[in-house]
């Protein structure tokens, strides 16, 4: 276990500690669900649990992805320096890190009700199969979307101890959003993925990726509006959704041009502001 200290920098890179935008993309939709389920008054306990749970599960997902893809990563310029691809960490060491993260995630779930505990196994299932989906389907972004959406279901169940239409509408919105922004991310590696045989929506949609991403983003807006109607939300929320729609239109139109990798990454990362905007809209709606 000494490697956790002596190789701490490699372990941090394995967990993407320096890149927490992924955690935020997982966390924000979970917070949307938590706030709506609690009608604007989430408990401090639930906030802490889902913040920690999002961090642990996103970090675990990064480790699982690198364990599954280390051979592919070694052949791609952007990923060849990842700890497993560069052989800075061994597979056994990565497995120990993964076990620790999943144990921490399990501990957080144990503070919630039995219904959430049972539902949490689905989150683990989708997180496990995502790294392998890109080997068999051109739609691995859909699997990622489900994995990144399950916190919505868990948050609602934690508050209500039941489920209803609203969390599934938020889930559908987030699934489309994740599929859209991960297509933008996959565009960075499209040429490399073609060489090594990895599938993605960026390859499936090709030159029409901007149109496909725009369509997915339009569905995000549709499902968020529908969720707002079911949750009886008002002007503050819908104003935020208007801002989200404008952002999505801007990003989709940007993708019509062939963009360098650095620009694509900026567009992908900027999706964090969508999460912020919807969250602010919900807070304003409940507290203004």
Image (spheres, grey):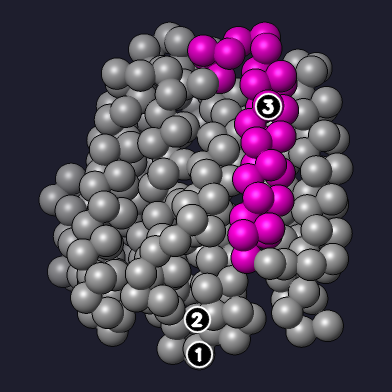
Regarding mark 2 in the picture, which secondary structure is present there? helix
**Magenta span:** 202-231
Q: Residue at x 40, y 29 (%)?
A: 140
Name the quadrant containing residue 199: top left
Q: Quadrant of the N terminus?
A: bottom left
Place of residue 33 in the rendered image (x, y in percent of width and height, measured from the top left): 54, 66
How far is disc 3 from disc 2 in space, using C-alphas?
32 Å
Q: Closer to the camera: disc 3 or disc 1?
A: 3
- Residue on which disc 1 sits: 44
Name the quadrant containing residue 114: bottom left
Regarding mark 1 in the picture, which secondary structure is present there? helix
Q: Is disc 3 in contact with disc 2, using a CB cutoff of under 8 Å?
A: no
Regarding mark 3 in the picture, which secondary structure is present there? helix
Residue 200 lies in the magenta stretch: no
How many residues crowd mark 3 within 10 Å: few (<14), some (14–19), many (20+)?
some
Q: Is disc 1 in contact with disc 2, using a CB cutoff of under 8 Å?
A: yes
- Residue on which disc 3 sits: 215
The one of 176 and 98 positioned closer to us in this rendering: 176
Place of residue 223 in the rendered image (x, y in percent of width and height, measured from the top left): 63, 45
How far is disc 3 from disc 1 in space, using C-alphas?
37 Å
Sooner in the amino-acid sequence: mark 3 or mark 1: 1
Q: Residue at x 39, y 47 (%)?
A: 147
Place of residue 173 in the rendered image (x, y in percent of width and height, measured from the top left): 58, 46
- Residue on which disc 2 sits: 47
The one of 124 and 219 positioned closer to us in this rendering: 219
The one of 214 and 26 positioned closer to us in this rendering: 214
The rendered magenta stretch, by its main secondary structure, is classed as: helix
The reply to whether residue 41 is in sight is yes
Report the side of 276 relative to 42 (left or right).
right
């Amino acid at each position: 276990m000494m490697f956790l200290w002596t190789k701490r920098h490699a372990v941090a890179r394995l967990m993407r500690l320096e890149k927490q935008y992924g955690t935020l993309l997982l966390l924000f939709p979970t917070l949307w669900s938590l706030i709506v389920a609690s009608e604007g008054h989430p408990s401090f306990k639930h906030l802490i649990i889902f913040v920690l749970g999002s961090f642990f599960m996103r970090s675990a997902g990064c480790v699982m992805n690198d364990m599954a893809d280390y051979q592919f990563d070694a052949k791609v310029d952007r990923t060849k320096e990842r700890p497993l691809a560069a052989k800075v960490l061994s597979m056994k060491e990565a497995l120990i890190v993964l076990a620790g993260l999943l144990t921490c995630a399990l501990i957080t779930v144990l503070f919630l009700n039995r219904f959430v505990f049972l539902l949490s196994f689905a989150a683990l299932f989708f997180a496990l199969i995502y790294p392998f989906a890109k080997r068999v389907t051109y739609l691995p972004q859909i699997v990622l979307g489900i994995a990144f959406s399950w916190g919505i279901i868990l948050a609602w169940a934690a508050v209500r101890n039941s489920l209803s239409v609203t969390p599934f509408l938020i889930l559908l919105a987030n699934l489309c959003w994740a599929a859209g922004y991960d297509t933008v991310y996959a565009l960075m590696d499209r040429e490399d993925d073609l060489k090594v045989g990895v599938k993605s929506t960026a390859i499936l949609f090709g030159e029409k990726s901007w149109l496909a991403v725009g369509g997915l983003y339009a569905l995000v807006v549709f499902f968020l509006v529908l969720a707002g109607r079911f949750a009886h939300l008002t002007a503050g929320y819908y104003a935020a959704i208007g801002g989200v729609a404008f952002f999505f239109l801007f990003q989709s139109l940007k993708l019509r041009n062939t963009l360098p990798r650095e620009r694509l990454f900026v567009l992908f990362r900027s999706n964090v502001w969508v999460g912020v905007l919807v969250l602010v809209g919900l807070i304003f709606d409940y507290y203004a």
